[in-house]
Image (tube, helix red, strand yellow):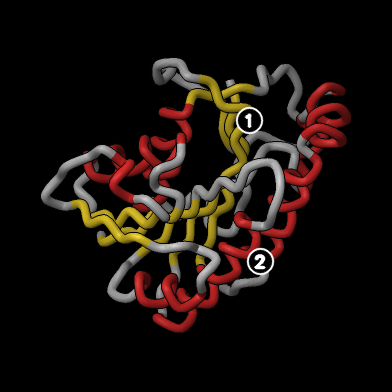
């Protein structure tokens, strides 16, 4: 499968590129500075561009079978939502249906999975702009009419991949650690390329 990854040089994007390549996919890594990816592979193509530029996104999209979105945007701005809107528009134009998008645990009906600290201190105050951007991002994906899966990981940690982790749990699930290794997020997202298990669903990820 030919896959384009937006946000390829981010902390999740790097792992996702490696995982998709190891799974046998042909990967286009889209980023403002794709040379920062630091990966060399015969099935990897680097594409330099800004996801906020609609024309650049449209050009990059041609010829792909699936799209993966792992955009970051700092604490301010609308890179996640505006970028995703541009991606959705380009997918429709090129007739590409499969979209796998990473947002965050706590969005939508998963808000009840959060503890007081994450719900009211982090997303209610410190990361309020980031959280709102993710909510708008999810709105664009849900309304797209595409074959989408929204992946909602808990807080990222730099740890080795775990033997198992929780995914697709209910909004009322309790006892979550509210953390997940970046490598496990990348594996889960890459696995969705060959699965319809979570089609039009919003699986959460956490230990």
Is label 2 in a helix, a strand or a loop? helix
Residue depicted at x 61% and y 56% = 79
Residue at the limit of the structure toward the bottom, as seen here: 93
- Please say if 117 is above or below 46: above
Q: Seen in the image, is 181 located left or right of residue 200?
A: left
Residue depicted at x 65% and y 60% = 81
Q: Which residue is mark 2?
A: 140
Q: Seen in the image, is 190 located left or right of residue 52?
A: left
Q: Nearer the viewer, residue 34 or 133?
A: 34
Q: Tell me, for residue 2, which label it has, or none.
A: none
Residue at the limit of the structure toward the left, as seen here: 42
Residue 152 position within the rendered picture, expressed as x and y whole percent measured from the top left: 62, 41
Residue 125 position within the rendered picture, expressed as x and y whole percent measured from the top left: 86, 34
Neighbor class of circle 2 (other Cα within 10 Å; few <14, some 14-19, many 20+) is some
Q: Nearer the viewer, residue 131 or 201?
A: 131
Q: Seen in the image, is 162 located left or right of residue 81?
A: left
Residue 17 in view (yes/no): yes
- Please say if 50 is above or below 92: above
Quadrant location of the N terminus in the rendered image: bottom left
Q: Nearer the viewer, residue 67 or 169?
A: 67
Residue depicted at x 58% and y 20% = 207
Residue 157 position within the rendered picture, expressed as x and y whole percent measured from the top left: 53, 21
Is label 1 in a helix, a strand or a loop? loop
Q: Which residue is mark 1?
A: 154
- Please say if 177 is above or below 54: above
Q: Is tag 2's residue or tag 1's residue first in the polypeptide sequence?
A: 2
Residue depicted at x 83% and y 31% = 119
Residue 148 position within the rendered picture, expressed as x and y whole percent measured from the top left: 53, 61
Mark 2 → mark 1, Cα distance in angstroms: 21 Å
């Amino acid at each position: 499968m030919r896959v384009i990854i937006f946000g390829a040089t981010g902390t999740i994007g790097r792992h996702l590129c490696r995982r998709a390549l190891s799974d046998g996919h042909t990967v286009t890594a889209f980023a403002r500075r794709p040379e920062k990816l630091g990966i060399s592979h015969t099935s990897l193509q680097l594409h330099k561009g800004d996801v906020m530029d609609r024309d650049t996104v449209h050009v990059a999209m041609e010829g792909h079978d699936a799209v993966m979105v792992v955009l970051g945007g700092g604490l301010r701005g609308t890179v996640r939502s505006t970028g995703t809107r541009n991606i959705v528009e380009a997918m429709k134009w090129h007739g590409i249906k499969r979209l796998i998008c990473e947002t965050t645990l706590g969005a939508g009906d998963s808000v009840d999975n959060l503890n007081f600290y994450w719900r009211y201190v982090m997303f209610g105050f410190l990361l309020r702009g980031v959280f709102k951007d993710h909510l708008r991002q999810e709105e664009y994906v849900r309304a797209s009419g595409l074959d989408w899966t929204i992946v909602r990981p808990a807080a990222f940690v730099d740890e080795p991949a775990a033997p198992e982790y929780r995914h697709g749990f209910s909004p009322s699930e309790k006892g979550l650690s509210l953390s997940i290794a970046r490598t496990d997020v990348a594996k889960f997202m890459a696995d969705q390329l060959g699965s319809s298990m979570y089609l039009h669903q919003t699986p959460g990820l956490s230990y």
